[in-house]
Image (cartoon, rainbow, N blue to C red):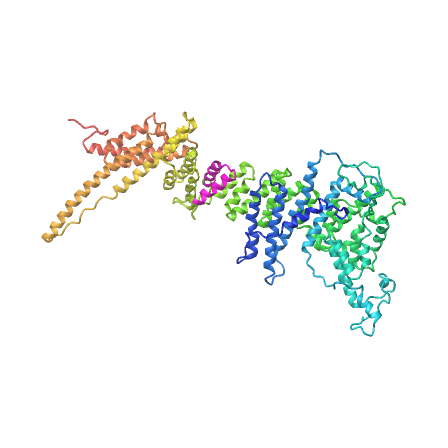
């Protein structure tokens, strides 16, 4: 920190350098392809995932932040490298990568301090220092007050980022005298190659241009502007030493000397009897009277500051020179005119905020023999809180700064600096709902909330879930199943099942399905619940409707997807009961829609040993399980009956055709061939009758299985009323058709007893019209019996 000029490096000074040094190598996963920028930045999806997945107990959350910042730096280096090879001035990826990387670094340095403070809360509080050492006083202030320490960390962060962006080339000679062209013209006006276009000063002291009201040589004027700009930029980057070196190099040692006056006074030779904390600087401990140490800082710092404040408001001085001095005397109004970016303005306000707080502490706690000179009232009026700093930025006179203050990355940085984590989470949740937000920004925000949740700051759990879910949905669109599985594992259990099941619904290939379930198991997801939810989601999809508004009877793509979804449950042998439950529901829906072929395909998905495994799992099956098995068997007998009827009907309509009759004048050879065809036809007819009889018997048996199903077909199932009203009359009429066409009239008449029986109560499932039609068909069978010399019940009539 600027105010802590100790010989040993400060813990906080090392923070940024640690991160910067870790950015030296490029990640090997990023390669140049046809679209290099997209390839480089898209690799961040996997790299971020690998960083989080690679976390162990030995790697803390702060190390994760450092790794994420490194990933951004690697991608940024590649983007810049590729940009330098093509004629493109700016690349969008470069801009947001910079902001993302900077935000990770800000999180790192601030939460490194905040977490350290939390771990030391039980220790003794710092004792306020009272004495003559300004340096010790300020050191104590930074250790005691979290806010002022964090403000200085933000300044360090802003300076480090400015240093990375600063790539200006210096155009100054290695060593020269100040204002050399003016000096040369004064000494040898007749030999100078390029004289000034105006009368110039005739003295070379720093104030000469002011009190003589004359300019320097034209070239020196340009050099002066560039030098002042460059000195300020070095200070903006936190490199005061480089700024002073540059000033001396250009022959302006007086400029370098100006920046020495702000240093805090500290005389290690003074003995003070003060209470100190264990980690307080030991330089004030009692020492041998013969040993003298160098005095540090400026004993007249207050005088320097008064003059610096006056100097920084002089209109005749270059704006950059005023700003450079204003940085060290806390005059924010001198700095702002040369700051055109949000970061620069924030840095200016932060420098002023810290300076005023430090000055106030020194004047309250330090004693000086001659007393401190009073500072102008305007200086103290600059005092503001952190919230007021950001209010100033949002209402800046500079439109560019106002616009940048509204950018999402800067708003995130604002909330982090203010430590308003709950407000940040709410803002991120709101942004994540917008379709205009890029997927890369969602990736960034998702990892921000995951970090905050990991360190115990994610108190608004609903906001964390919202942001992560939004990112997961984008990954689902990208078909990144492994990444989806991992980030889903960061959600609540209920959301895990529903969201991952939603992603897997459209995966059809068997190998991809198995891989998706492996990812789920690796991430600790409930694969059994997910597999079940996939089927539930799929069968809930709306049915396709044709142009006339009628439900389509043919098998649609949605139907195929629903049928295929059963395979998710078949993967696990311990889910056979779920297979039965879900398949029963699917078949029920298909039968209601009249899609028997689809119902048959769904039924065929059930493993043949499903019932055996279900009953083997427990000794005594529950009533609910028995009902599930009963429903399964109900569908089984119905589908078998329907298939048997179709086989019989197909055979019935496939009766062999008799050969055409021959004309009277047919030749003998043709008659022989005709008689052969007749005999062959008789054989085929007999074979057809035999097959037809066999199929009729099978169909009758299967259809009776439906009507006489124990305890009633599908009885007890949920919402079975409509399906029983449809299936049982339909099966009855099919059975009646088989019996009539097969001339089994006695059984057809007996069908009336079965329908009317109170044991089965099948008549309750018929409408009056259906019963009337059934009785008509039975009456026709009775008539056929009487024509065969039998009574209407099929009994032989005796004379």
Q: Quadrant of residue 336?
A: bottom right
Q: Can residue 376 be seen in this view?
A: no
Which residue of the protein is positioned furthest toward the front in this rendering?
290
Looking at the figure, which quarter contains the C terminus?
Answer: top left
Residue 695 in the image: state x and y as whole percent.
Answer: 26, 37
Residue 381 magenta-highlighted: no
- The rendered magenta stretch, by its main secondary structure, is classed as helix
In the displayed structure, would residue 319 be above or below residue 112? below
Total residue callouts: 0
In the displayed structure, would residue 799 be above or below residue 590? above
In the displayed structure, would residue 456 be above or below residue 333? above
Residue 382 in the image: state x and y as whole percent.
Answer: 80, 48
Residue 533 magenta-highlighted: yes
- Residue at 30% in and 34% down: 702
Q: Which of 480 and 49 is in front in this view?
A: 49
- Residue at 53% in and 45% down: 483
Q: Quadrant of residue 175?
A: bottom right
**Residue range highlighted in magenta:** 511-538
């Amino acid at each position: 920190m600027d105010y802590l000029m100790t010989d040993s490096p400060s813990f906080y000074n090392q923070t940024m350098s640690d991160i910067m040094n870790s950015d030296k190598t490029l990640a090997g996963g990023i390669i140049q392809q046809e679209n290099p920028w997209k390839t480089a930045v898209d690799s961040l999806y996997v790299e971020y995932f690998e960083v989080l997945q690679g976390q162990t107990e030995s790697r803390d959350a702060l190390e994760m932040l450092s790794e994420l910042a490194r990933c951004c730096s690697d991608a940024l280096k590649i983007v810049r490298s590729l940009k330098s090879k093509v004629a493109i001035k700016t690349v969008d990826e470069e801009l947001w990568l910079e902001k993302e990387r900077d935000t990770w670094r800000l999180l790192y340095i601030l939460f490194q301090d905040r977490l350290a403070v939390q771990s030391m809360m039980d220790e003794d509080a710092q004792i306020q220092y009272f004495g003559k050492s300004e340096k010790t006083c300020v050191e104590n202030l930074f250790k005691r007050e979290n806010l002022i320490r964090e403000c200085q960390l933000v300044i360090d962060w802003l300076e480090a980022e400015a240093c990375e962006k600063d790539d200006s080339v210096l155009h100054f000679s290695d060593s020269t005298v100040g204002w050399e062209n003016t000096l040369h013209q004064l000494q040898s006006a007749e030999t100078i190659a390029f004289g000034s276009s105006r009368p110039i000063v005739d003295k070379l002291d720093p104030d000469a241009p002011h009190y003589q009201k004359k300019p320097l040589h034209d070239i020196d004027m340009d050099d002066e502007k560039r030098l002042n700009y460059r000195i300020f930029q070095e200070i903006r980057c936190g490199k005061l030493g480089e700024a002073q070196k540059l000033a001396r190099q250009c022959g302006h040692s007086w400029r370098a000397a100006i920046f020495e006056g702000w240093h805090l006074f500290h005389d290690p030779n003074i003995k003070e009897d003060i209470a100190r904390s264990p980690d307080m600087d030991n330089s004030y401990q009692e020492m041998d009277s013969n040993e003298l140490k160098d005095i540090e800082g400026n004993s007249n710092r207050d005088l320097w500051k008064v003059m610096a404040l006056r100097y920084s408001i002089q209109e005749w001085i270059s704006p950059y020179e005023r700003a450079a001095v204003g940085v060290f005397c806390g005059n924010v109004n001198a700095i702002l005119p040369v700051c055109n970016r949000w970061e620069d303005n924030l840095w200016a306000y932060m420098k002023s905020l810290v300076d005023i707080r430090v000055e106030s502490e020194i004047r309250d706690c330090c004693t000086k023999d001659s007393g401190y000179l009073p500072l102008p009232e305007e200086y103290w009026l600059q005092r503001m809180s952190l919230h007021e700093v950001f209010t100033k930025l949002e209402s800046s006179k500079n439109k560019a700064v106002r616009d940048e203050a509204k950018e999402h990355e800067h708003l995130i940085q604002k909330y982090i600096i203010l430590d308003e984590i709950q407000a940040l989470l709410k803002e991120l949740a709101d942004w994540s709902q917008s379709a205009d937000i890029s997927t890369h920004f969602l990736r960034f925000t998702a990892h921000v909330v995951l970090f905050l949740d990991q360190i115990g700051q994610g108190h608004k759990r609903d906001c964390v879930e919202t942001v992560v879910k939004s990112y997961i949905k984008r990954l689902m669109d990208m078909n990144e199943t492994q990444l989806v599985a991992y980030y889903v594992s960061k959600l609540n259990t209920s959301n895990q099942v529903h969201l991952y099941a939603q992603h897997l619904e459209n995966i059809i290939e068997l190998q991809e399905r198995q891989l998706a379930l492996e990812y789920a198991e690796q991430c600790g997801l409930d694969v059994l619940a997910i597999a079940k939810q996939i089927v539930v989601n799929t069968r809930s999809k709306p049915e396709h409707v044709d142009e006339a508004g009628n439900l389509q009877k043919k098998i649609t793509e949605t139907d195929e997807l629903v049928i295929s979804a059963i395979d998710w449950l078949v993967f696990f042998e311990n889910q056979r009961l779920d297979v039965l439950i879900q398949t029963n529901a699917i078949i029920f829906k298909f039968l209601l829609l009249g899609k028997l072929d689809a119902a048959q395909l769904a039924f065929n998905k059930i493993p043949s040993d499903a019932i055996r495994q279900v009953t083997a799992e427990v000794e005594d099956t529950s009533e609910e399980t028995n009902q599930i098995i009963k429903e399964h068997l109900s569908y089984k007998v119905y589908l078998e009956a329907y298939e048997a009827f179709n086989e019989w009907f197909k055979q019935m309509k496939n009766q062999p055709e008799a050969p055409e009759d021959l004309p009277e004048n047919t030749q003998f050879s043709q008659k022989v061939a005709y008689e052969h065809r007749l005999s062959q036809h008789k054989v085929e007819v007999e074979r057809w009758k035999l097959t037809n009889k066999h199929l009729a018997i099978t169909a009758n048996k299967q259809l009776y299985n439906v009507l006489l199903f124990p305890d009633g077909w599908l009885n007890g199932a949920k919402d079975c009323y409509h399906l029983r009203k449809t299936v049982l009359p339909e099966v009855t009429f099919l059975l009646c058709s088989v019996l009539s066409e097969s001339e089994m009239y006695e059984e057809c008449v007996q069908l009336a007893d079965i329908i009317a029986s109170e044991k089965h109560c099948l008549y309750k499932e018929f409408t009056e019209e259906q019963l009337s039609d059934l009785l008509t068909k039975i009456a026709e069978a009775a008539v056929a019996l009487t024509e065969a010399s039998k009574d209407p019940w099929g009994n032989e009539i005796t004379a």
